[in-house]
Image (cartoon, grey):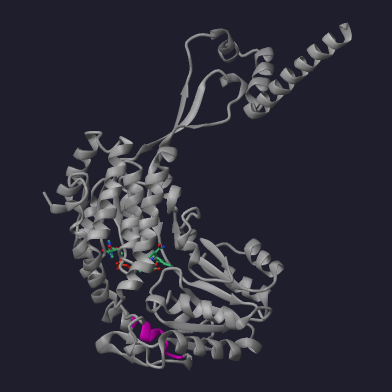
Amino acid sequence: MSREQQAVQQARKAFLTGRSKPLDYRIKQLQNLKQFIKEKTTDIANAMRKDLHKTANATQLFEILGLEGEINLAVSKLAEWAAARPVNKNLLTIADDVYIQPEPLGVVLVIGAWNYPIAVTLQPLVGAIAAGNAAVVKPSEVSSHTAKVMELLPLYLDPEMYKVVTGGVPETQELLRQRFDHIFYTGSSTVGKLVMEAAARHLTPVTLELGGKSPCYIDKNCDIRIACRRITWGKYMNCGQTCIAPDYILCESNIQDKVINEIQKCIQEFYTNDPKSFADYGRIINQRHFKRIMALTEGSTLAIGGDSDESECYIAPTVLRDVTPGSKVMQEEIFGPILPIVIVNGLKEAIQFINEREKPLALYIFSSSKKVIKQMISETSSGALVANDCLVHFTISDLPFGGVGNSGTGRYHGKYSFDQLSHLRSCLIKKLNMEGVNQMRYPPHTTEKLRWARVLLLKQVNLARWRQVAQVAVIAALAAFVVQRFLRR
Ligand SMILES: NC(=O)c1ccc[n+]([C@@H]2O[C@H](COP(=O)([O-])OP(=O)(O)OC[C@H]3O[C@@H](n4cnc5c(N)ncnc54)[C@H](O)[C@@H]3O)[C@@H](O)[C@H]2O)c1
Ligand SMILES: CCCCCCC=O
């Protein structure tokens, strides 16, 4: 039996004991996960530095804080999320208990990516634990140092319930041959298709957190200086290796020079004149990606940057101008520090450009006009839309994070993670009395019974309204009583 098969079997055996169901068990595991990130802070920081040239503070800021927030939220809200959720009833079921009971799915496979290896691997795990599942975690082999640290997770969590399997493509493929109750995958759309195909063999549901090209439209009616500060930050953070980084800019030709000029100033301010020596400027994860990104620039006109050093996987913050839709850089997600500017003739053309392509994970618009922002919202589709900023939607646990179409399926963060990894079971508990009411549904199906069924089934019962009506009735009765007594005097 393979190591992967064993891990899944052990996790399933542990799940079937039922011990992951009580809420205090789940809370304990979540607290232990927090303990892991606390005690292993230095190991994680060192690993991130080796994998992606991230500083300890950047790791805290962009990976650990969010994870900690998600754990804290799950711990504080778990009782509420896991509780039965009463629903509206019809007149036929008015006397019954009708509610949704979230229940664990079983064994969840979490496959992580390498760019924010802690956040995109352990945040789904928070959801899996909170929802009462067992889990097999597969960190990305590409961020190998961070994967090594995640191997220590079972020292903190229930080691039978939560397994970590490391390895590369063959190991992931072997895992995908096993039967899971849910697969939560983060990575490219290409591999996402393979994951979905493997899952289909077992009819296993999937969450696919994928990528793609996230457009960024700069309206001429906007503070271009401020827009460029926020875009520069969102694009070059983690060396452009962010799933929701603005992939390319769309703007009118008469503001292109100003945009380039402002981005140039921001690059200097954020990363100095020598980003290569600057601690807070990252590196491309490996040489394969370095070569891929450098090849994307071929045939386009350089406006800023362009320096590179393969031996260090360094690519300078780069901007390309007057990029044509047919150019190489516009054919795939860049996932690196190259920012193409594509000229469009106003909002309408920008919307058309976006709609002619795959639905993006994020769509950014910079404009001072609410009307323009509203039009972009109503005439396009994307996983998320952010106006006048970049990336920050990722930090809000109450916003579902995920793609649409080619950028993914499913969502997570906060309660969405809990719901995504739960089965929302419909429950209806009827008593064995009041059989007369049911007469109407038993044969023979007469016209009179049908008339009753129409009333009882189609009439929506708004219990809150009924309560209001009852209150009004009580007040009216009281008033009548008072008036009567008054009149009698
Ligand atoms: N939506 C999100 O939350 C999110 C977050 C991070 C990254 N991403 C996207 O991920 C992509 C980058 O990640 P990546 O795909 O390079 O990461 P990756 O190469 O680390 O792959 C992700 C996972 O898939 C597995 N894998 C790779 N090839 C496989 C194969 N042939 N069969 C089975 N499993 C395989 C890997 O082992 C890894 O665990 C980008 O497109 C980015 O936008 C999305
Ligand atoms: C602000 C942190 C962004 C993390 C995005 C994860 C996907 O790559």
Total tally of numbered discs in the picture: 0
Residue 207 x %, y %: 39, 53
Considering the whole magenta stretch, tell me its main secondary structure. Answer: helix
Q: Left or right: where does residue 79 sit relative to residue 165?
A: right
Point out residue 224 in the picture as x, y percentages from the top left corner. 61, 82
Q: Which residues are magenta?
A: 292-299
In which quadrant of the rendered view does residue 120 lie?
bottom left
Q: Tell me residue 480's x, y (percent).
A: 81, 14
Whether residue 120 is situated above or below residue 46 in the rendered picture: above
Q: Is residue 444 magenta?
A: no
Quadrant of image for the C terminus? top right
Answer yes or no: is residue 43 visible.
yes
Which picture quadrant has residue 53?
Answer: bottom left
**Residue 264 placement (x, y as % from top left):** 50, 90
Name the residue located 37 percent from the left edge and 86 percent from the top edge: 295
Residue 151 quadrant? bottom left
**On screen, residue 278 above or below 285:** below
Q: Ligand 1 appears in which quadrant? A: bottom left
**Which residue is outermost to the front?**
489
157, above or below 85, in the image: below
Q: Residue at x 62, y 21 (%)?
A: 91
Is 292 displayed left or right of 39 in the figure?
right
Residue nearest the viewer, comparing 123 with 203: 123
Q: Is residue 193 left or right of residue 405?
A: left
The residue most toward the left is 1
Residue 133 seen: no
Q: Nearer the viewer, residue 94 or 453?
A: 94
